[in-house]
Image (cartoon, grey):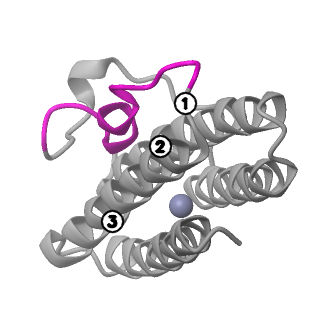
Amino acid sequence: MEEIQLFLAHAIQLEREAASRYDELQAMMQSAGNKEVAAFFADMARFARRHLEEAMQRGGFREIPQMHWSEFRWPSGVSPEAAAWEGVDALMDVQSALLLALDGEDRSRSFYSQVRDATQDPDVRRFAAEFAEEEAGHVEALHHWIERQHAGR
Ligand code: ZN
């Protein structure tokens, strides 16, 4: 696998996990009766799926690339999303759900920026930079929602 494809395979995995995390968070907020935050999480799931699509197209993958976990090269051994998932529970309140989502976005952002800074491949760098920037936007959006919750609005 070429470096760009290897990178995109990581991005695909990360965004898949992000999308399903947001699906779960969305369902939790829905059942907790918080429609506003549920709708926000639904948007975030859509963004993750859009990223996933982009990475699939760019990598020329017709199907999700099947990789053994040992082929992945995550900075800390597990995918950033999987790391963020530790500590989830079904009775999570809004604040904890937002903090969990923030943690996932923050880890994704730092994964993409680490790739951007480490790679020698200009295509990988361009993509990783673009994705890192979008993740930074998601981190910002989450900070905004967390502040709103604090302010009780
Ligand atoms: Zn994101």
Disc 2 to disc 1, how far (Cα)?
Answer: 6 Å
Disc 2 to disc 3, how far (Cα)?
Answer: 24 Å
The quarter of the displayed image where residue 30 is located:
top right
The quarter of the displayed image where residue 86 is located:
top left
Q: Which of marks 3 and 1 is in front?
A: 1
From the viewer's perspective, is residue 68 above or below residue 125? above
Badges 2 and 1: C-beta atoms under 8 Å apart? yes
Left/right placement of residue 115 relative to residue 86 reads left
> Regarding mark 2 in the picture, which secondary structure is present there?
helix
> Regarding mark 3 in the picture, which secondary structure is present there?
helix
Q: Give the range drawn in magenta.
A: 76-91
* Residue at x-position 71% and y-position 49%: 45
Quickly name the residue at label 3. Answer: 112
Quadrant of the frame with the N terminus:
top left
Alpha-carbon neighbours of circle 1 within 10 Å: few (<14), some, or many (≥20)?
some
Quickly name the residue at label 2. Answer: 96
Alpha-carbon neighbours of circle 3 within 10 Å: few (<14), some, or many (≥20)?
many
